[in-house]
Image (spheres, rainbow, N blue to C red):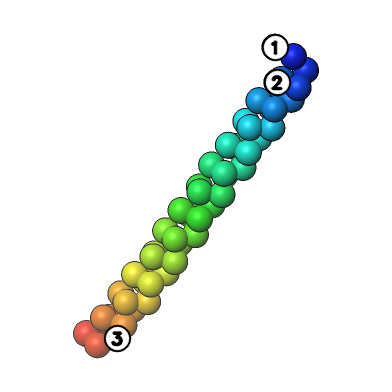
């Protein structure tokens, strides 16, 4: 492999890593939002029950 190819593959790996990190982050955010909504719904049900 030439230096250019090595450099390119390194950039690709970094890009893939960043993309995976973003996907993971957005998934965590969605799960957090979902849990928060579930808690709000749960507390609303509790208030209705009370």
Can you identify the residue that label 3 sits on?
47
CB under 8 Å between discs 1 and 2: yes
Q: Is residue 8 left or right of residue 49?
A: right
Name the residue located 63 percent from the left edge and 32 percent from the top edge. Answer: 12
- Location of residue 26 in the rendering, given as x and y in whole percent from the top left corner: 50, 55
Crowding at label 2, few (<14), some or many (≥20) Cα neighbours within 10 Å? few
Dot label at residue 1: 1
User: Picture quarter containing residue 6?
Assistant: top right
Identify the element where label 1 is drawn: loop
Crowding at label 3, few (<14), some or many (≥20) Cα neighbours within 10 Å? few
> Comparing marks 2 and 3, which lies closer to the viewer?
2
The N terminus - image quarter: top right
Identify the element where label 2 is drawn: helix
Q: CA distance from mark 1 to mark 3?
A: 67 Å
Seen from this angle, which residue lies furthest right? 3
Can you identify the residue that label 2 sits on?
5
- Location of residue 11 in the rendering, given as x and y in whole percent from the top left corner: 69, 32
Q: CA distance from mark 1 to mark 2?
A: 6 Å
């Amino acid at each position: 492999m030439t230096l250019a190819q090595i450099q390119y593959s390194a950039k690709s790996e970094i890009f893939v890593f960043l993309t995976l990190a973003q996907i993971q982050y957005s998934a965590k955010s969605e799960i957090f939002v979902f849990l928060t909504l579930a808690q709000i719904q749960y507390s609303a049900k509790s208030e209705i029950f009370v």
